[in-house]
Amino acid sequence: MYMKRIRHGWPLLVAVFLIYGLDRPWGAVPPLGRLFSPFAGFLQNVERARDTMSGSTVLPGLRGEVTVWYDDNAVPHIFAENDDDLYFAQGYVIARDRLWQMEFYTLLVAGRLTEVVGRAALDYDRYHRRIGLARTAAAITRRLEQDSLAGRILRAYAAGVNAYVDQLTEKMLPVEYKLLNYRPERWSPYKSILMLMNMRNTLNGGSHDDRLTNVLARYGQDIVADLFPRYPSVESPIVPAGTPWPFTPIAVPARPAAITAPPDTGGWASRVPEPAPQVGSNNWAIGGGRSATGLPILANDPHLQLTLPSIWYQMQLSSPSVNVYGVALPGTPAIIIGFNKDVAWGVTNTGSDVMDFYRIRFRDSSRHAYWHDGQWKETTLQVETFRLKGEPDVHDTVYYTHHGPVDATNGLAMRWVANETDGADLLTFHYLNRAANYGDYVKALSYFTAPAQNFVFAANNGDIALISNGKLPLKWKEQGRFLLDGTDPAHDWQGWIPRAHNPGVKNPPRGYVSSANQFPADTTYPYYLGWRFAHSARALRINERLDAMTQATTDSLRVLQNDNFNGDARRILPRLLASLAADDSVRTTAEYGALRTWNYRNEADATAASVFEYWVDELMSELWGDDLPPDEQLLYPDLDRTFELIDKAPGSRWFDRSDTPDTVETCDDILRSSFKKAIRKMTEQFGPYSEQAWAWGRVKGTRIMHLVPNLTSFGRTGVWNGGGNASVNATSITHGPSWRMVVQLDTTWPTGFGVYPGGQSGNPGSPFYDNMIDRWAAGRLDTLLFMKHAGEPSERLRHRLVLEPEMK
Amino acid sequence: MVYILLLLLGSAASYFGPWWAMAPVCFIVCAAVRPPAGVAFRISALAGITLWVGYSLFLYRDDPAGLTGKVAGLFIPALPAVSDVPPVVLVAVIAACVSGLISGFSGLAGARFRQLISGS
């Protein structure tokens, strides 16, 4: 009997075992049964003509009917009867296209990736918990939920996202959930705030403080002052030099005698990354005096890491109180960069020094108390719990001083504007969406905390303006340039620059405003903002071109956005080539020839651009690598100071390599040896010199990868384009213009143009996943369909989706 | 006939049920119809393969964004030997293996179960 049961029962066991085994992941192998079932798996994500988009759906929570028109680029145009429904519909519509992405960002910022990818993400998560973003997001959410307007917006948006989450069936799940084997959580106001925290971290989450403090410890004040000046030798600040400051400065806290408390050991290594030089942006607006129509034109292109799904999502939001077009951040209410009937606005990162570190004296190794202002003060502690996929929980204790969180690895506390909990950043965008004039713009900006942005503005009454906006700490000169003393209250952040004193300019005589992350103001500005801003090459080029513009059109500005001119090459290459000309072995080479006849443009087919870029990189490490090795946590001087030394101080001691005590290298020696090294490196990587193999577009090899690095086949590689870090078209390998927008203001109806390197859909199975990449790489812009009302006919409208309230 | 029945019931169950819905269908049909064990396995496996591969190819025929290739591409780094295999073939083979084995063993289990309870 027993044997018989086994004989007859074993196939059932095998079947059950197979189902169990194929229903779950094994290591990196996804659940094959579920994934490859055509009924539930990835093939259900294949999207054809977006046929699912037309029709109507009943959504509990709506008060009135909402019409959503999708145009030929899959951009939704939402028409609602009130603002609650508008934000509800925005959440619903974005979730349909980007749910996986927006949830992924919240997991990343909150340090919860271990829950979906396991132990591999633990260090990454621990870092994000230790810098305090999730804790701050929770505090901001608690406060905003009491705010009658912000709380309402956040709740309506979350309800819209959840209306979609509630509709999701297994087969409708975005393919990433199927691959990584988890399900979406419900959305909440807290998660929308986490999205904004992600931007704070991206744009304000870097620091040079550790490396510069180490330089100070090794070489002293004079050398730091010489190699790391507080203002560049060549600059074109955002507020034009000579603009009078329209305010009486307030008193700045007194500068203490000791401005730093260096660490005991030389090589202080912060876990905070260095600011990424590729994260920057351009924006400008020309006044009517320079435009063909006599009304302003505004342009903006924020440079971020290029990813799929894209960081931006185009949409039009319309209700009785607003009609606005632009890009939203998935997960966040309102339009972040865009335009309405009367005004247009855009942002670039300000990049002032808003992250400082304090050396803390703890009473004992328990870290429960620290010495400050002559007394012991209690730390607060927060126990962080990490839930690991398939493993027991891991705990970590984070200590907080009044400055901010303490880095467990080195005991330093961090004061960071990203952890400020006041303000209501999202209201800035809510009000900008509705702005009709300069006064509305200034009022809207007053709600904004961080990350400080240079908000460019133009209105159809002719006004143009640009304000570096956000909370900026009121510091004594050089406060926070080096590691600070956590026991000394004079080293605390002691206040804020009054908002009306932030650098800004309205309708300047030169007829345009612009920013490219450079110094907001020259040395006449009465407050200390920081010592290093973005390299000035882009700013100089933009202002030079704008200075020359008359009768400009939207296309003039599109061309400038795509300008590949390399300002650094014009500045320094003639001097570099002069040193090569003296070397017979170099003068006859094809590489030298290419550089000599180059027009300084980083075009995709330019081989000279490749050689120049590699050469400058080698030059930096040849010149500074011996005295300031990065692996000893020391900082290189910037390009501006380096070029200035080559130009004006070729006899400087820094050209003599300290690792060759028997020989004295000159500036020319370094230029020639770095050139030869660059050529050797390129030959190894790309083969011998040829027009094809060394073309800049190929050497640079811009790639736009999926947010999950392992999903390589979901990304695009080898995108053919020009540009670079010293060009207005700041496209590098991994970063670049994440949205290009040009808006012609008009008294009747504006015309907007835009494109971003991706597509509206976050679904790799959709034709709208990456359909804009080729147009973006070619420098083209789409004409944006900005509808006057829901009934306006247009040949470009494709699908109509009606969101209906539940019948009462 | 059993094959047609498996296809009809299997597609309905798979459309509305979980991804492994073919398994109970094969089990119940084979328990009810009582084919010989070998036939039960073969006919169930064949129906499972037909259903999954057929529907996969139906969906694949209009895949403008090439999702099949993108998903197949995720497996290539781990399986360099199949890098020259067209993605749709790779997907079809995996679908056939998964569905064929589960359906086949479920059908066999159904037939055996019937033998067990009817004592033959």
Image (cartoon, coloured by chain):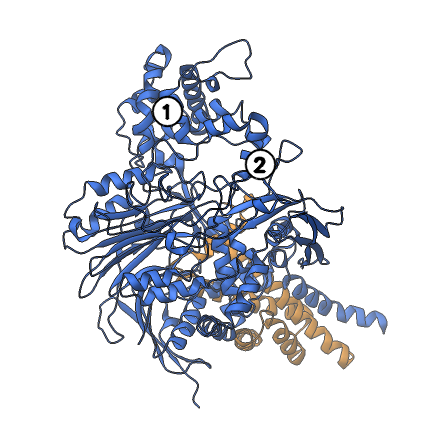
Chain colours: A blue, B orange
For marks 2 and 1, give the CA distance. 54 Å
Question: Which one is earlier in the sequence, the residue at label 2 or at label 1?
Answer: 2
In which quadrant will I find the N terminus of chain A?
A: bottom right
Q: Position of residue A96 (x, y in %)?
A: 44, 68
Q: Which amino acid type is shown beneath numbered disc 2?
A: Ala
Q: Position of residue A115 (x, y in %)?
A: 63, 59
Kindly tell me whether residue A772 is visible in this rendering: no
Identify whether A486 is placed above or below A419. above
Residue extending furthest top?
A662
Q: For the residue carrying disc 1, how many other residues have a C-alpha within 10 Å: few (<14), some (14-19), or many (20+)?
A: some
Left or right of A642 in this view: A288:
left
Q: Name the residue carrying label 2.
A: A258
Q: Secondary structure at mark 1?
A: loop
Q: Nearer the viewer, residue B71 or A611?
A: A611
Q: Chain of mark 1?
A: A
Q: Chain of mark 2?
A: A
Left or right of A577 in this view: A710:
right
Q: Name the residue carrying label 1.
A: A689
Contact between marks 2 and 1 (CB within 8 A): the answer is no
Residue extending furthest bottom?
A808
In which quadrant will I find the C terminus of chain A?
A: bottom left
Identify whether A521 is placed above or below B47. above
Q: Which amino acid type is shown beneath numbered disc 1?
A: Tyr
Q: Position of residue A53 (x, y in %)?
A: 37, 71
Dividing the picture into quadrants, the one containing residue A524 is top left
Q: Nearer the viewer, residue A499 or A173?
A: A499
Identify whether A798 is placed above or below A720. below
Q: Nearer the viewer, residue A191 or A35?
A: A191
Depth-wise, is mark 2 or mark 1 nearer the camera?
2
